[in-house]
Amino acid sequence: MRVKKIVLAAAITMVAAVTLAGCGKKGSSSSSVTTTGSTSGNYQGVIENGRYKTSKARGVNTAQNANVYNLKAFESGLTNVSKLVFSTKSYIFQEGQYLSSSTLDNWLGRKTSSNPTGLNPAKGKSSDPNPEYIQQIEEQDYMQQSGNSLKLKGIVIGIGVNSEYTYQKTTDGPDYTKNISDAEVQKQGKLAAAKILKRLRARKDLKNVPIVIALFKQASDDSLVGGTFFAYSKNNGSTISSWKTLNYKAVVLPKASDSTSSNSSDQSDNSNFTNFKTQIQSFFPNLSGVTAQAQYYNNSLSGMNITVTTQFYSETEIQSFTEYIVQAAKKYLPNGIPIEIKIQSSNSIQAVVYRNSGSSSYQSHIFSSY
């Protein structure tokens, strides 16, 4: 699993700088292409002429999402889907270069006479509008070394589909919400996927590139966890060949009652986290909140992100509390999965405790200043 970015950002930047110094040119004399280097299990990124190569549609998904957890889950989840098809050892990641901001804005809009490429249906009646199903789209490109340059070897497209639609019958009127069934989410996602695949294949430079399309069910806007990917398809032609199911689930801990857990494993995970929460609450006064985002894959716990919020009055309080968190995590939290514990005040992050996948020990970092 990924190394915790919040702690290692500076180290990764240094790695990138060292890589830049040693890589040399991989393109023509007018264009210098290098890579960022990578930590274990992650892709290298592309640097062109000394700058990170950003997406042609940078910022579109951020503008589309009211729930930041959906955005984060969508982006990290899409990379995990990519790893199922394009190995981090054999491929280099490049931000999407084929779908522009204007193209995605049009695709994410409603289909009208002025926007014939819209993937969402015409609005219909204001009193009972058709839902906007497709909420976000992201492109990832995967490259391989070809002589002195990088060559496109695959594209991954993520499609985020709404699970609910909020609308107003009149301007500045009350909000109404339509729930969208799982069956409809799957139907609309697959319809959009078929259209997008045909549009990409119409481009001369994308006729023969493997294209992976992954479908994501958005969580509601007020959810404390993001949505999850539920299917993907790898395609060499212009029509969808078949779909592979992805069984992810994201939940918030602690649950109101173990009786709401679907199986004994869920109940055990909830109980363990509740014990962890109780333990640290008894150690440190005035904790504002202790919650976790837990992810399950094929009904097994695969990762946990925990947020602890409180008010600190001194650096020594932060240090002592962080050390105690490490001990409580070892005692109460499950083994064998990546865990991140963010310790924050109302104003900023104070410290982080984390354990990477496959590791038996926790590491911590306290954010200080001079």
Image (cartoon, rainbow, N blue to C red):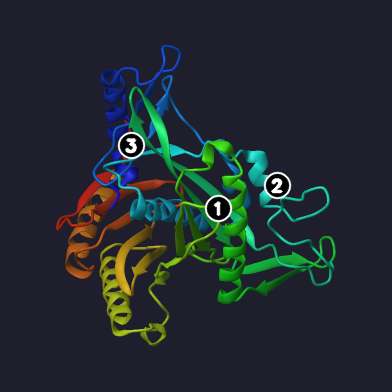
Disc 3 marks a residue whose amino acid type is Gln
Q: Percent position (x, y) of residue 95? A: 47, 38
Task: Tell me if mark 1 has few (under 14), some (14-19) or many (20+) residues whose alpha carbon lies within 10 angstroms of its own.
Answer: some
Does residue 44 appear to the left or right of 59 in the view shown? left
Which residue is more in the foreground, 9 or 25?
25
Q: Kindly identify which residue carries mark 2.
A: 106
Circle 1 or circle 2, nearest the eye:
1
The answer, for residue 65, to whether it is visible in the render is no
Could you tell me which residue is drawn at 61 percent across and 38 percent down? 100
Disc 1 marks a residue whose amino acid type is Ser
Does residue 129 appear to the left or right of 326 in the view shown? right
Precedes in sequence: disc 1 or disc 3: 3
Does residue 264 appear to the left or right of 231 in the view shown? left
Q: Kindly identify which residue carries mark 3.
A: 44
Task: Give the spatial CA distance, label 1 vs label 3.
Answer: 29 Å
Total marks placed: 3
* Picture quadrant of residue 218: bottom right
Which residue is more in the foreground, 339 or 156?
156
Precedes in sequence: disc 2 or disc 3: 3
Task: Give the spatial CA distance, label 2 vs label 3.
Answer: 31 Å
Task: Tell me if mark 3 has few (under 14), some (14-19) or many (20+) residues whose alpha carbon lies within 10 angstroms of its own.
Answer: many
Task: Tell me if mark 2 has few (under 14), some (14-19) or many (20+) residues whose alpha carbon lies within 10 angstroms of its own.
Answer: some
Could you tell me which residue is drawn at 60 percent across and 51 percent down? 198
Disc 2 marks a residue whose amino acid type is Asn
Q: Kindly identify which residue carries mark 1.
A: 238
* Picture quadrant of residue 168: bottom right
Q: Percent position (x, y) of residue 28? A: 41, 16
Task: Give the spatial CA distance, label 1 vs label 2.
Answer: 21 Å
Residue 233 versus residue 113 in the image, above or below: below
Mark 3: which secondary structure? loop
